Image (cartoon, coloured by chain):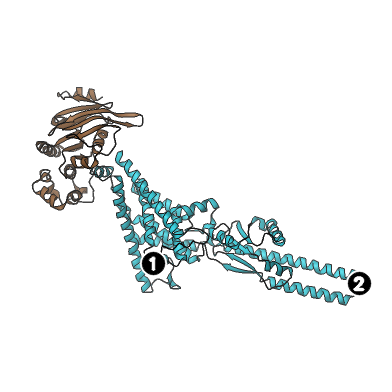
Chain colours: A cyan, B brown
Amino acid sequence: MTVVVGLAVSAIGYAIVNSESYKDQHMRYKLGIVGSTDSNMLTMGVNLLKNDDDSRFMLDIVRFDDEDDARAALRNGKVSAYVLITDEFLNSVNALSDDISLEYFATSGQRGITGVMIDELADIASELVVSSEKGLLVLEEDLRNAGFPSEAINAQVDQLLLLYVGAMIARGNMAEFSELGLANGLTTPEYYSISLSLFFLLLMSFCSISFFLGKKKATYQFISAKGLGAGRQILAEFFAYFLMNLFCVELILFFVRKLVERNIIPTQNGEIIGDTILIKSEFNIILVVILFSALAFFIFEVVTGVINKFLAAFILYIGMAYISGYFYPKSFFPDGLRILGINLPTGVAFAYMEGLKRESFSTLSSSKMLVGEYVSIPGCIFMMANYTLIFILGSVFIRGRKIRK
Amino acid sequence: MIEIKGVTKNYGKKQVLKGVTFDVAPGEIVGILGANGSGKSTLLSILAGLQRSNGGYFAIDGKDLLGDSKLRNKKVAYVPQENPLIEELNAWDNLRMWYDAKTLKAELKNGMLKLLGIDEFLKVPVSKMSGGMKKRLTIGCAMNGGPELMLLDEPTAALDMVCRNEIYDYFESFRSTGGSMIISTHELQEIELCNKCYILKDGVLHPYTYDGDLQHLIGILE
């Protein structure tokens, strides 16, 4: 069962990363623009972009005064990318010089918006060509009306043309693209190594489903009549169930570690894609195993019948994992769904593992705030503990009802 | 002396037990008769501590058991109607959940478990036991700690004559040591075994003496 689950997760992960829908995202993008709100030129540019016939169907423009806000929004998935427009850049444009360029920031999951931005820059270049042509014609006409000789006019027009061409060539490098990772600063392999490892942990709860088979209300009642009430029954069973899950996880990690040692599993920069997090945080992963064990225990306690238990848990796992960003980046979802996904047990576990990854698996006592999410690792642990408590108390409540019926 | 006074139980607005009152003397078997859904199992589950009553008093030798779960667990054994044993385990392992090894060996050698004949199938998994073996093992598990009162919910339902007689023999030996029993039953054989019987109807307990007229009994229950 354990091997089957491992293979299934690997297959799903491979399919997701290589799916066409992942590569070609057709959606409306939110683009952040960072720059001084006092700048009339920037305001005018943003308005132009908003009202451009092409881009208004593709882009929602969100203005930011501060780059940190834009970066936080990007990491939270509130914007798909942001462009940093400094005062120096605006001055450079005004002076038709070529020494300052735009800075464009996106996550690696936003390949689509990169294309949109490149199209926009090409459009801007076209506009510049048209405008410069007009400028040349106006200059020529003004000089002619002023009575300048043809040689002088041609020399001035040539000089302006060269200036425009120089500016145009420079504007070919108008933007510098920086990739901030898929989400929260993680690269695509890091992101999916976390998400698939967590999904793998969720599915691992099925390995111990036999623990819940053949149980009868009469057994609960009999044990309760002997002085072990619903609370003590659930605590004892949950502890046993958690240990079984942990054993299964550690067993797989043991074999993965052996394969790595013998260089059978390929590595990238010394890390194993897909199992990086698990291997590096064997102690820390226990907290996630506790949370997911409690979740599975609650589902299995509520639902009766082995097929029903399996189906209910599987459907819930898929749904929760999906909206928590296990298969697609969180920015893929609308705000409401994204916030829900982040706050589900699967989302909290994801934030916790992301935090560990970003802090290079430092100690749990670290109170460093995670940029963007504003959730600390202790905060994640607190939320995971709350969820665990809720699931266990829920199980106690359900068991109590079974005993009393 | 076991005293049960004014036990009431409501499910929402429906009153299932309306001040149930009776006594059980040491060595006495009391039978509770009633139609399905009359509240027999509810009464037993309240006395066993599985459910809370809405009022009433349950005591052994003047010590209140409804408010003292530790004392109740020591003094009262409960045998549910369905098999509560863990199917994957054998008889020994099921017994070990409730007995320490030393006591268990002593009981199997010449104690109450020997009387139940459990020593004959110690290594048999529950899933391969007959109904009679399961019931005897359940009683054996329930009886650890030497309780004074045994609550039995239809103890011989779906058992054949031989199994019933084995269990009745055990009841007689338990009674002979001063143990008391409250049995919820439909079986005539068990009614005849009881020192006194009550019929639970509409939440009220009525004294009843079986005089061999089955039709009369059916009429009362209906």
Name the kind of residue labelled 1 in the image: Ile
The image quadrant that residue B69 belongs to is: top left
> Vertically, is B220 above or below A307?
above
Residue pictured at 67% horizontal, 59% vertical: A37
Q: Is residue A171 left or right of residue A178?
A: right
> Vertically, is A241 above or below A122?
above
According to the image, label 1 marks what residue? A279
Quarter of the image with the N terminus of chain B in it: top left
Disc 2 with disc 1 on a shared chain: yes
Q: Secondary structure at mark 2?
A: loop
Q: Secondary structure at mark 1?
A: helix
According to the image, label 2 marks what residue? A147
Q: Where is residue B165? Give x, y as percent.
A: 12, 37
The answer for which chain carries disc 1 is A
Q: Are there few (<14), some (14-19), or many (20+) residues within 10 Å of tag 1?
A: some
Whole-number angstrom distance, CA of label 2 to CA of label 1: 81 Å
From this viewpoint, which residue is outermost toward the left?
Answer: B110
Q: Is residue A270 left or right of residue A211?
A: right
Name the kind of residue labelled 2 in the image: Gly
Residue pictured at 70% horizontal, 70% vertical: A92
Q: Where is residue B188? Give x, y as percent.
A: 16, 30
Q: Where is residue A16? Give x, y as percent.
A: 48, 61
Residue A338 visible in this rendered orientation of the protein: yes
Quarter of the image with the C terminus of chain B in it: top left
Residue pictured at 44% horizontal, 61% vertical: A353
Q: Nearer the viewer, residue A394 or B91?
A: A394
Disc number placed over residue A3 in the picture, else none? none
Q: Where is residue A405? Give x, y as percent.
A: 31, 38
> Vertically, is B22 above or below A113?
above
